[in-house]
């Protein structure tokens, strides 16, 4: 699968992103969500950060799947999700 990078303005809170792509005259709308997960929201703040991310994601909306985990800071980790419908298109396009 090929990748492109699209800069997203740094806005506070959850960001819902819809991208319409046209590849070889085939139109598809892809839906992404970027959320910041704050370490302070971890139920066990003494745990390893990977365990903390896993615990926070266990409470997340199942209609969205993890697409990318960004570089963590001392305060949070940004996580990009893709909607299940968009992910089906992305996976079928590579098959």
Image (cartoon, grey):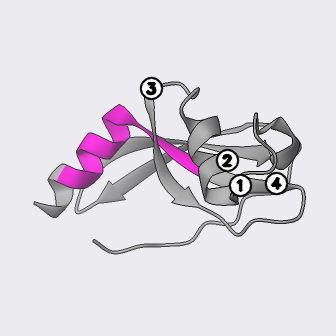
Give the alpha-carbon distance from disc 1 to disc 4, as whole Å: 7 Å
Label 2, label 1: how far apart the Cα atoms are: 13 Å
Label 3 vs label 2: CA separation? 18 Å
Mark 2 vs 1, N-terminal side: 2
Q: Residues within 10 Å of mark 1 (few under 14, many from 20)?
A: some
Q: Position of residue 49 (x, y in %)?
A: 69, 58
Which of label 4 and label 2 is nearer to you? 2
Q: Are marks 2 and 1 in contact (CB under 8 Å)?
A: no
Please determine whether, in this image, residue 82 is positioned above or below residue 76: above
Q: Give the numbered dot on residue 52.
A: 2
Q: Is residue 53 among the parts visible in the rendering?
A: yes
Disc 2: CA contacts within 10 A as few (<14), some (14-19) or many (>=20): many
Residue holding disc 1: 78
Side (left or right) of 88 relative to 76: left
In contact (CB < 8 Å): disc 3 and disc 4 = no
Q: Quadrant of residue 30?
A: top left
Locate residue 22 relative to residue 48 in the image: left or right: left
Quick check: is 48 in the magenta stretch?
A: no
Viewer-nearest of labels 3 and 2? 2
Q: Relative to residue 37, is residue 51 drawn left or right?
A: left
Q: In x, y percent, where is residue 35? A: 70, 43
Q: Secondary structure at mark 3?
A: loop
Say which mark, if any, is on residue 14: none
Asked if the residues shown at circle 1 and circle 4 are in contact, with their CB atoms under 8 angstroms apart, the answer is: yes
Inter-mark Cα distance, 3 to 4: 21 Å
Q: In the rendered image, which residue does mark 3 sit on?
A: 62
In which image quadrant can residue 54 be found?
top right
- The disc, 4 or 2, on the residue closer to the chain's N-terminal end is 2
- The residues colored magenta run 80-91
Q: Earlier in the sequence, mark 3 or mark 1?
A: 3
């Amino acid at each position: 699968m090929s990748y492109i990078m699209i800069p997203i303005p740094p806005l506070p809170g959850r960001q819902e992103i819809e991208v319409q792509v046209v590849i070889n005259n085939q139109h598809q709308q892809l839906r992404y969500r970027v959320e910041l997960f704050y370490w302070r929201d971890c139920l066990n703040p003494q745990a390893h950060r990977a365990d903390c991310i896993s615990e926070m994601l266990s409470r997340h909306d199942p209609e969205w799947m993890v697409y990318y985990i960004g570089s963590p800071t001392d305060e949070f980790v940004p996580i990009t999700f893709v909607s299940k419908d968009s992910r089906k298109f992305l996976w079928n396009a590579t098959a």
